[in-house]
Amino acid sequence: MKLLDENILIQRTLNGDVQSFEEIVKRYNMMVYTLAYRILKNREEAEELAQDVFIKIYSSLKSFNMKSKLSTWIYRITYNTSINKFKSQKRRIVTTEIDRYAEFNAAVIPDVHSNVAEIEKQKIVNDSILKLPETDRIIITLYYYEELSIKEIAEITELSVQNIKIKLYRSRQKLFKDLNNRVN
């Protein structure tokens, strides 16, 4: 199926076209998984949560307001579902392995030496991000990894645009300080 307008995919899905929903899943699966993983810090839980999120999306697609972006709506569902799961488990941040993004890059980069160096850099950055408070960590992830706008992040997290800007600024300072300490 060629890239179709999201509204067409939504309409077809609502009319019972399974392939249209499969296309939505293909488009957003990695995004949903990545956000869930960054919150939950566990691959299996993130995969399971991603499935739950797509079930929620399918069952509530009729309530989607087509005036907003589908990606923002999906982020919001993923964010809420992930935070609820995280809070229900009452667990804190634990050490994590290199995430899927780094593994994907490792498979693509042919030069082994630069590959190892890149993975190590990503691990250091990821470890520094893990030290941030939960909300700051999510904002950094949405802004830098998912490349969402500050306005979109504000909609997803239900924080003000100004609050997002402040948290981004402070998080950058914390990351810079932590990364500086690691390098020196």
Image (cartoon, helix red, strand yellow):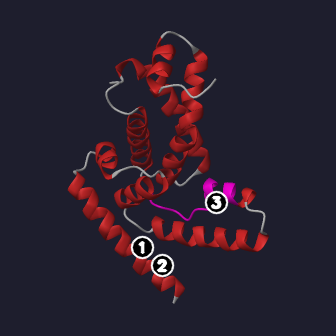
Dot 3 or dot 1, earlier in sequence: 3
Which residues lie in the magenta part?
91-105
Q: Secondary structure at mark 2?
A: helix
- Mark closest to the chain's N terminus, 2 or 3: 3
In the rendered structure, does residue 72 fall within the stretch colored magenta? no
Which amino acid type is marked by label 3? Answer: Ala
Image position of 181 with respect to 89: above or below: below
Q: CA distance from mark 3 to mark 1?
A: 19 Å
* Circle 2 residue: 179
Q: CA distance from mark 2 to mark 1?
A: 6 Å
Q: Which residue is mark 1?
A: 175
Quadrant of res 112? bottom right
The kind of secondary structure the magenta stretch mainly shows is loop
Q: Secondary structure at mark 3?
A: helix
Residue 116 falls in image quadrant? bottom right
Element marked by disc 1:
helix
Is mark 3 in CB contact (under 8 Å) with mark 1?
A: no
Identify the residue at horizontal 54%, vertical 28% (top origin): 24
Tag 3 residue: 102
3D distance between C-alphas at marks 2 and 3: 18 Å
Mark 2–mark 3 CB contact (< 8 Å): no
